[in-house]
Amino acid sequence: MESWVLERLQEFVGRNDRVSLQPRVQKALTFQSMGEHVSYRVAKNVPSLPHGLVVADEGVIPDYARVRRVFHLTNAITKYYYSPFYLETQVPGYHARIAWLGGRQVGFTRDGRYCAFTTDRARDFVPDEFFAENPRLAVCLSVEGKGIPYAKPSYSGTAEDIAAWGTEILEHGIREPMATGDKYALFEKYGIEAAEHVGPFEAADVDRIVEWMQELEEAGGYGVVLKPSERHHRPLKFSLPSTLMNDAPAWLGLDNVLDEDPYFERLLQAACAAAELDRKPEDWDWSRVGKAVFGALAEVVREIADGGSLTSECSVWLHEKDAAAELLVQLEERAPGTSIHELSLEQDGDGWRLRFERRFAEATAGMERRLSGASYRD
């Protein structure tokens, strides 16, 4: 491992952690490359080195701030917060960090891997001018739309190819994200679209907060993230009940269709959120809820019973042709139990249109075993 890696991390960790840093580095870091770019990522948590952190020649790109989920937001505010905070709407999609490396924008996934798709498309949402004037900053984006290459379409059903919102700004070598007010100011200055937000609030403003959340619920919002005004405070996430109940197919994914426990947790979370927002059981359209919860699973079972297999097709647009090959390789590496198959790659306007199929072999085999009459311990 190159000496510069240890040097960068010694600047990042606290003084007490530097003594035992080298064995931790050797245990936690994984080398990776994409084109001419090389870096190391923390593949598993070790003390002082959180999962997803990236070490590049230009510096240490921090991991994402861990956002804990709460089932009752207003009680959590009074429990955890004593300084001003903002409420930011949750935006659907996958999360990526955009950093300025080797004179271009480079995208990383939440777990620190290179992302060829985000690298190719990031300039559509973050101007190069931002990095020219702030080369040691990184922008966190939430990316969604019909044209993303990951797992399934976004929750919101946007008609756009892809859309993106800035959620955080990170600084090389500093653990905590930039203060929320400063982040919004930079987003506005450089024309980076931010998620809808209100504030700052104080803990005593709970009535106003509940009123805003009720309006967001009626408007079909997904949820809120409580963003602190100071670096050291923890962000908190709260999902709204209608989305949790009525958009069940969004979290009933083909890649984890046989894993049941998380779904009960989502239903419990929805019930807690409904109680906080005074949504009574008689207000729900229960036929719609039941169809949403059961319908996606029933369609999967019928497909297998008819001799089919679980697949999903994806179409993405890219600026550069080379990014298509890099993306397919990355998807194959990140998809245990599935396989990726290119269907076509054709020129489309100023870029390229890639179509590929994701085949869920393990999930298909598991469902076939159940339909065969095999017995299982319950």
Image (tube, rainbow, N blue to C red):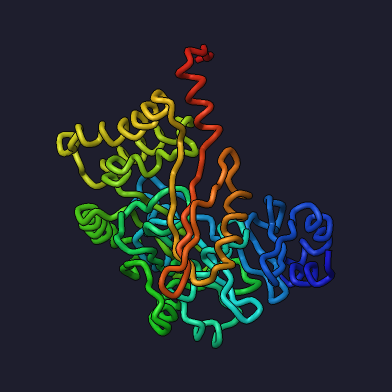
Q: Is residue 299 left or right of residue 321?
A: left
Q: Is residue 321 left or right of residue 220?
A: right
Q: Is residue 64 above or below residue 332?
A: below
Residue 320 location (% of width, % of height): 53, 71
Q: Is residue 241 above or below residue 140?
A: above
Quadrant (top left, top right, bottom left, bottom right) of the N terminus: bottom right
Residue occupying image coordinates x 51% and y 37%: 360
Q: Is residue 166 visible?
A: yes
Residue 139 location (% of width, % of height): 51, 71
How many discs mark residues in the rendered view? 0
Residue 45 location (% of width, % of height): 68, 51
Residue that extends furthest to the left in the rendered view of this protein:
282
Instruction: Choose between 284 and 128: the one closer to the eye.
Output: 128
Q: Is residue 232 visible?
A: no
Q: Quadrant of residue 336?
A: top right
Residue 298 location (% of width, % of height): 34, 28
Instruction: Choose between 81 and 231: the one closer to the eye.
Output: 231
Q: Is residue 357 left or right of residue 60?
A: left
Residue occupying image coordinates x 74% and y 60%: 31
Q: Is residue 275 above or below residue 17?
A: above
Instruction: Choose between 89 and 325: the one closer to the eye.
Output: 325
Residue occupying image coordinates x 41% and y 35%: 263
Residue occupying image coordinates x 47% and y 12%: 373
